[in-house]
Amino acid sequence: MFIDEGLLLSYIFPLLIVNFIFVLTTRNKAMFYNMQYLYFRMKDDQVGSVNIHKKLFTQAWLDHFIKEGYTFGQETTQYVYYYRFISKLDHISNKGEVLECVFIAKRNAFDFYSEEVDREIDQILMLNNKGRNIKKIVVLQYKRYNELNDKVENEIDQIICFTNRFQYLIHITVGYFEKDNQVYFLNPKTKYANKYYYYGCQEIRKQIGLFEE
């Protein structure tokens, strides 16, 4: 029996498209639910606010980033930021270079998830892309607050913890309460969403003086 190949393909091709869309949609939903699960697991396991001895948002604190190998990025009326590329994270991963950025808000109203931050990160990648294929980005973002309440906590907890195969995008907000010299961020005791979120938390602890490097 002769079957017209073109006719057969006209039936099969739409089915393949529908199947592809179904698989993609299902996979994206599974990724979303998994990220939600990992987020709430960290919330349930978090340390809470901590007292620190180091003063943040001082010139000495900002100078420390340069001493630790960060490159000064830019300073505006809204923020200042530093960045560095790390080829290997000891005891975490020896595969794939990591871009680590530190954004420090100068105004309480500044939104870390604005287009300005995205443009700065894109600019870093564009200017430093020679021989690089960056798939792992960790952004630590500091902001001052007057007091820790439910509204402030919810704002600080708006982290990004995205992963897709070998790609990672981490944003962790750190709230600094100058009057009490306290810090709050989504800081789990042991149940980290992934190893790059763990790395981000470890770097924050160093930067705020919870332990020495």
Image (cartoon, helix red, strand yellow):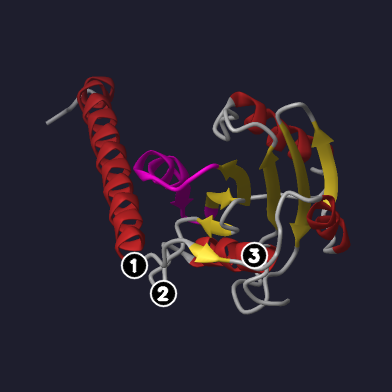
Q: Cα distance, mark 2 to mark 3? A: 15 Å
Q: Quadrant of residue 52?
A: bottom right
Kind of residue at badge 2:
Thr
Q: Residues within 10 Å of mark 3 (few under 14, many from 20)?
A: some
Q: What's drawn in magenta, residue-wise?
A: 146-167
Q: Count every numbered label the image shows and give the total.
A: 3
Q: Residue at x 60, y 29 (%)?
A: 110
Q: Which residue carries the number 3 mark?
A: 203
Q: Is residue 37 left or right of residue 146?
A: left
Q: Is residue 46 left or right of residue 170?
A: left
Residue 78, image x, y percentages = 70, 29
Kind of residue at badge 1:
Asp
Q: Secondary structure at mark 2?
A: loop
Residue that extends furthest to the front in the rendered view of this protein: 179
Q: Residues within 10 Å of mark 1 (few under 14, many from 20)?
A: some
Q: Are marks 2 and 1 in contact (CB under 8 Å)?
A: yes
Kind of residue at badge 3:
Glu
Q: Which residue carries the number 1 mark?
A: 45
Q: Residue at x 23, y 36 (%)?
A: 22
